[in-house]
Each structure stands twice: as C-alpha cells, then as structure tokens.
Amino acid sequence: MKSPFPPPSPPHAIVIGSGFGGLAAAVRLGAKGYRVTVLEKLDAPGGRAYVHRRGGHVFDAGPTIITAPFLLEELWTLCGRRLSDDITLKPLDPFYRIRFDDGSWFDYSGDPEAMRQEVARFSPQDLDGYDAFFREAEKCYRLGFERLATISFQSFSDLIAVLPDFMRMGAWKTIYSRVAGFIRDPKLRMVFSFHPLLIGGNPFSVTCAYTLINALERKHGVHWAIGGTGALITGLVGLVKGQGNEVHCNAEVKEIIVRDGRACGVRLADDRLMESDIVVSNADTAWTYRYLVPARHRRHWTDSKIERTRFSMSLFVWYFGTRRRYSDIPHHMILMGPRYRALLTDIFKRKKLADDFSLYLHRPSASDPTMAPEGHDTFYVLSPVPHLESGVDWACAAEPYRKKIAAYLHGSVMPGFEDHLTESFVTTPIDFQNRLLSFRGAAFGPEPVLTQSAWFRPHNRSEDIDGLFMVGASTHPGAGVPGVIASAKALESVIPDPSTLRRANA
Ligand SMILES: Cc1cc2nc3c(=O)[nH]c(=O)nc-3n(C[C@H](O)[C@H](O)[C@H](O)COP(=O)(O)OP(=O)(O)OC[C@H]3O[C@@H](n4cnc5c(N)ncnc54)[C@H](O)[C@@H]3O)c2cc1C
C-alpha cells in the first residue's frame, strides 16, 4: 500500500564556494543522498578556476595543467556519465618547456626515453641518477598519493598508522635535497625539483613526498581540456545540477550559524539565513575560521593559531592577448630566472619582492583555437611573489612589476610583443585576499611543509564544530586540482550518512 505521508526530504548540505573542491564535494554529497546548495561569492563558479572572457579571448584565471584525469572520471561515474560525454581532454607532449636564463631549455615530457635524451643533453653522467630518482618518485606516488591522499586525518592515531609510509618515503628530506642526492647538474636539479611550486610549496622546504607529482604526471599525463579549464568547471556544475541540486552565484556567506556546538546553516551577505544539516566550507580554512565562525565557538582554530600558520606564497598574474600568433612559444613554458634558491628564500622566508623572477608563461591558443580570435594568441604570465606579509603596496607596485615582466619577455622569448597587445589585466595578492577571501592573499592556503600536512593540516571534519567540514586547497591533502578533488573524497569518508541525520531530525 502506498504510504499516506510524503517521503522525508533528504538532509540539506550547504557548500560554501564553487572551486574544484567545492563542486567535487557537491557531487559526492549529492551521490550520497544529500540535497545540496552551493553558495558562491563571485558572479560565476570556479574560484581560482574562474574564466575571464574579453575581446574574444578566453582567459582561464588559474589552473591550466590538468593531471590525474581519473579523479574527474570518478565524479562523472558517480552521476552515471562519462567524462568524455562533456569534456575533450587533449594529452600534451611535451608537458612543458623549461627555459633557463642563458637561453637553453629542457623539454619535459612523460616519455622516459625522450626524457633520458634531454637529461643526456645537459649531463650524461646524471642518467643513472635520473633513473634512480624516478624510482623513488614512483614509490612516493604509491605511498603518498594512492594511499594517503584520500585518508581523512582526523585523529593522531591516523597519523601514527601511516608513519611507516612516511619513513619509507624519507619524508623528512626536502624535495630539493632528494633531487640533489641523485642529480648533480644544477639545471637538472631545477627541472626535477620545481614541481611543489605548482601547489604553493618551496622546493627547499617541502617534503620530498611531493616528488609524487613527477610520477603522477608521468603515469597519467598532462592534459588540456578543450575550451579551457573553465570547461571542466561548467561540466562539474552540470553534474551538480543534473543531480537536482543548486549552484547560486553572487551569494557570499558572512557567517556559519552555530547552535549548541553544531553548524546548522549560514547567514548570507544580504542577511538571509539558510538552514542546513551540515555545512561544508570550500573557502580558505583560515578565512572560514577567522571570519565566518565567531571566536566563541573556536577552541582549536583560535585567532592566534591562525596567525601562527605559515602560508604559501601568492602570485602576480598578467593576462594578455596579442593580435598575432607566436608559434614558437609552447603551450606551457617555465622561464627560470637567474636565481633559484635565493629567489625562493626572498619569496617564502624574507617575504621580499625581488627585482628578478621566475615565470610561468601560458599560451592555451597553442593547443586550442577556441581560446583566442583567429590569428590572435591568448596568454598569461605568472610570477610567484610573497604573500601580503611582505607589506608591498600592490596598488602602486603592480604596474611597474608588470612592465618589468614585459621587458623580460621582450628580451627573452617574445621580442616586440607589446606592439601587438590587445587585452591586458592583472591579478595581485590583494585580489587573492579581497576577491577570493584567502588569508594573507596566499594563493595555495597553508604552505605544504611536513608540519602542516596530513594530520597537521586543517582537518576535513572541523576540530571545533560538529557538522562543519572542509574541502579544498587549505585542508587535507592540499592544493592543486588533483589535491582538491582528492580532498572531496577524503571529506566523503567523514560525512555522516544522510539516513542517520534523517533519524536525528525526525
Ligand atoms: C594562477 C594559478 C594557477 C594554478 N595552476 C594550477 C595548475 O596548472 N594545475 C593545478 O592542478 N593547480 C593549479 N593551481 C592550483 C589550483 O588552482 C587550486 O589549488 C584549486 O583550484 C583550488 O580549488 P579549491 O576548491 O580549493 O577552491 P578555490 O578555487 O579557491 O575556490 C573557493 C571558492 O570559494 C569562494 N568563497 C570564498 N569565501 C566565500 C564565502 N564567504 N561565501 C561564498 N563563497 C566563498 C571563492 O569565491 C571561490 O570561488 C593554480 C592556482 C592559481 C591561483
């Protein structure tokens, strides 16, 4: 007989923020049976993967190097679809070109033989060390990524349980010292150690466990999503909506409402209240605790603990279009400046804006004609800079800094390009703070040093408040698109089963 009562409505989860982590969390919550509302401060989803469209150019604001596509595939599978239904991924070969200040370059790819040839061009005596380095990197991938990335480190015993894995990886060593233990050539040491910069870490401070990135790229490739990284965000929003759930933009959360020690909804910037059974924050964890949760509810994440956190570097990004094409610039190019360790010390430790820089130059129109008007190119150039503790007044410093970068590009790989500029705009650490609400304007949350990783990183389930959860770059496992998508999986393991909440609410 049909029940005379309507079925109970599913428990409600609010997700604050629509970055890759927030959207991946929304998909997993939806698949678990929650009704999900994603609330996004900006006028469009994506967070660091926001898309600026100007003059026919498509500027992906942030992530461009797409690795570990199987993590995306899992989300599509949860919705009964395939990633290829919505997204065309194009494998890139080489992954990127690393150009040194003297004009020489190394083409970095996933082909072990091509890589050996590149290593031999610089230093044949480092070939054995290179092979041995990759064997270690693969071990770190198996232990650090396959086993640890999706564990949610909630208790100290979770950490104790994985200590043998940390020992096997030699995790107390820095990535630079691990590379230097195998490879002697100074340029090759840069080539194999710079990867943690992609997730906000200084190669001279972060654990060598992050050599897992070298192995991850080799195993699963570096890809480009046709239409840009924004196409992945559109695809994820489509999954959330396809589950019958909602993504609201221009919806800034001002407070997480806590009643009897439990998160039970949010207050929006327009003072609207929205109730929920759980709240998941994809916003920066430091910002979430400091500004969205009143201090009286926080015993662990006190203001002084937040202040004591070591934050990652920030970024200066110049987006520009040209009315001609630069066919000899590859899709991804890293331009190493004259200094390596000393520059990173300026950025991470001295918090000093240096006169020199190392740059990442992105030319998506090299692989994808949809990214620029015909005959034009779309670019961004990114420079790691200290976060806002530097005291730099970016309102004054931005334009001279942009000009310095332009002069460097003119003198190195794009002579005369400024005569062909069309669109031009920049992002500074102030935007990371004021627009993306990131503490100290850090681009990647807490710096991923060993003492701020795994159990030591802000937990996926709040240490302070029941029913409050964290997902994204500033919780476990950390920044980068694979990291934040993995964090949604770690989150899933600590989210209550919706049926238990239904009973509690009945
Ligand atoms: C320039 C740049 C280049 C990068 N390149 C790469 C790359 O090539 N490959 C790679 O893997 N990674 C890259 N990264 C790192 C990667 O982009 C990030 O680690 C990842 O996208 C962060 O995702 P997230 O889910 O943590 O959240 P975010 O993208 O930070 O999104 C958080 C969202 O929360 C919203 N929000 C914050 N507070 C509130 C509030 N109170 N109310 C409502 N909404 C709120 C924000 O507006 C934002 O949309 C790059 C990062 C940058 C900045």
Image (cartoon, helix red, strand yellow):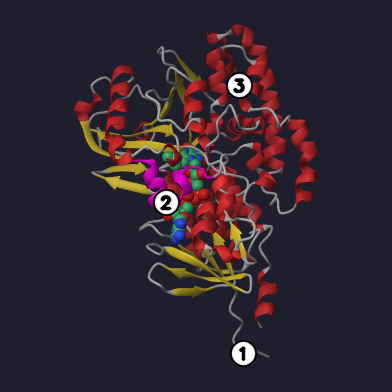
Q: Which residue is mark 1?
A: 5
Q: Secondary structure at mark 2?
A: loop
Which residue corresponds to the image point at 53% horizontal and 9% vertical from the top-left?
A: 121
Q: Which residue is mark 2?
A: 436
Where residue 248 appears, x then y in whole percent? Answer: 42, 65
Q: Residue furthest left?
A: 419
Q: Secondary structure at mark 1?
A: loop
Q: Is residue 76 visible?
A: no
Q: Is residue 433 magenta?
A: yes
Where residue 485 appears, x then y in whole percent? Answer: 57, 49
Q: Is residue 162 magenta?
A: no
> Which sits in the foreground, 296 or 288?
296
Q: What type is the residue that disc 3 sits on? A: Pro
Q: What type is the residue that disc 1 sits on? A: Phe
Answer with the quarter of the image where residue 338 lies.
Answer: top left
Sequence-earlier tag: 3 or 2: 3
Q: Which residue is mark 3?
A: 112
Closer to the observer: label 3 or label 2? 2
Q: Disc 3 to disc 1, how far (Cα)?
A: 63 Å
Q: What type is the residue that disc 2 sits on? A: Leu
Where residue 84 appears, x then y in whole percent? Answer: 50, 48
Closer to the observer: label 1 or label 2? 2
Sequence-earlier tag: 1 or 2: 1
Image position of 201 (left or right of 369): right
Stretch of the chain drawn in magenta: 427-445
Image quadrant containing the C terminus: bottom right
> Which sits in the foreground, 287 or 390?
390
Sequence-earlier tag: 3 or 1: 1
